Image (cartoon, grey):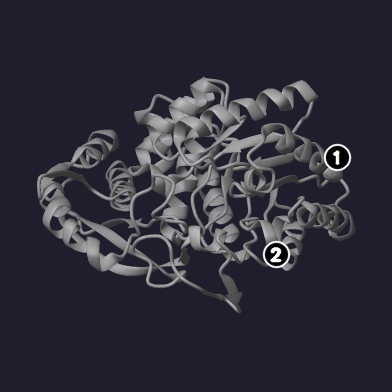
Amino acid sequence: MKIKDVLYSKGRTGFYFDDQEAIREGVQLDGFIYKGQTVTDGFSSVRIPGESISVMLVLENGEVAFGDCVAVQYSGIGGRDPLFLADEFMPLIENIVKPHLVGQELDSFRRLAKEIEDIKWEEDGEVKRLHTAIRYGVTQAILDGVARTKKKTMAEVIVEEYNLEIVAEPVHIFTQSGDDRYINADKMILKQVSGLPHALINNVKTKLGENGEILLDYARWLKDRVEKVRQDEDYFPTFHFDVYGTFGLAFNKDPEKIVDYIALLEKTVAPYKLQIEGPVDMGNRELQIKTLQEILRLIDKKGLSVKIIADEWCNTLEDIMDFAKAGAGHIIQVKTPDLGGIQNSIEAILYCKSHGVGAYMGGSCNETDRSAQVCVHVALATQPMQLLAKPGMGVDEGYMIMHNEMMRTLQLLKKKV
């Protein structure tokens, strides 16, 4: 089956682009709007509506395969590609992606995805590559197209092309609360999600506390709330807090002090398991790896059970391989839009698992329903330890999209096993 045409449309994502550096510096939240000066290049205001580009492959038989080009909420920092505004990047799809794909045979996801990943051109004396968001969305469409051609689920295509085995079991879904960390926690508990609440701890003064006291108070509340609201006494979710490097800011990037605080937090949430994502942001990749190694060493020395998740400065497939080899994290987030082509997320998960490191298939609230659905198929094929519910920050919508796609696909897979 060949690709007859490539169409594309500008769309919305499930959340917003936020200037993380401006937020860290203390801009004020006014309702849902941040008031203050921007810091990161490309931002016209601290919070702007997220944008996507939906790429549609028209097949010879009239079917349409599609994927969505999206970038993460905190774009343009930490080694990531710049802010992804659709009007700026649609011409690349028209002038570079479309000519490459039209007429191609949809016989191999891996082959076509690699070709998209490898596209380069020279402009003003500089070698350019497609934005990670474009590679992400176009390869989603290719995976869908190959699946339609072969009359299989996208998960089965991955299993076949990567020589895996079908494991017709669900992957744990982790949900994120956004700033509404109290009401949204109730939603998570009622739906008995496997991991919660994320909590968006991205500012020391307002969300962590100068000595971590605000997060400790919230953790106590969350533990009590689970035990009060849960309808099944056997429900024991993992407590996962994404702290965006704020532990480092509060404790002067001192690993000893950071781990002492983590120990207190672990004691506070016991008997629930604890995961901390992004405890420190050291400003560059090499120092980030070194500091996370030291934090893990101290955690082992103190006999703690907490799991540290690497996120900042761990964006590409190569980054993830280096963090995994260095042992710079018990778990590594595979932040799908940052890796470009979806094949890189597949390979990153498989690499982590082969090196005894946990793989968390994450992403962003700023994705779409389509990118979320495709990620479900990747997760079912590769079986990471957990999968982020996305898009959005409302809990219900993102969880529904991914849970239902997973249940539908599992039913199809079980019938074939």
Q: Which residue is mark 2?
A: 184
Whether residue 194 is visible here, answered yes or no, is no
Q: Residues within 10 Å of mark 2 (few under 14, many from 20)?
A: many
Coordinates of residue 340 in the picture (x, y in percent): 34, 44
Task: Residue under label 1, please give it.
Answer: 267
Q: Give the amino acid type for the residue marked by disc 1 in the picture.
A: Lys
Q: Residue furthest bottom?
A: 31
Q: Residue at x 30, y 51 (%)?
A: 141
Label 1, secondary structure: give it.
helix
**Quadrant where the image shows the N terminus:** top left
Write down the quadrant of residue 253 in the picture: top right
Asked if 254 appears above or below 406 in the picture, the reply is above
Q: Residue furthest front?
A: 252
Q: Nearer the viewer, residue 385 or 299?
A: 299
Q: Tell whether 259 sits left or right of 327.
A: right
**Observer-nearest of 394 and 211:** 211
Q: Position of residue 346 (x, y in %)?
A: 42, 35
Looking at the rendered structure, the kind of residue marked 2 is Asn
Q: Nearer the viewer, mark 1 or mark 2?
A: 1
Q: Residues within 10 Å of mark 1 (few under 14, many from 20)?
A: some
Q: CA distance from mark 1 to mark 2?
A: 24 Å
Residue 95, above or below 237: below
Residue 146 lies left or right of residue 219; in this view the side is left
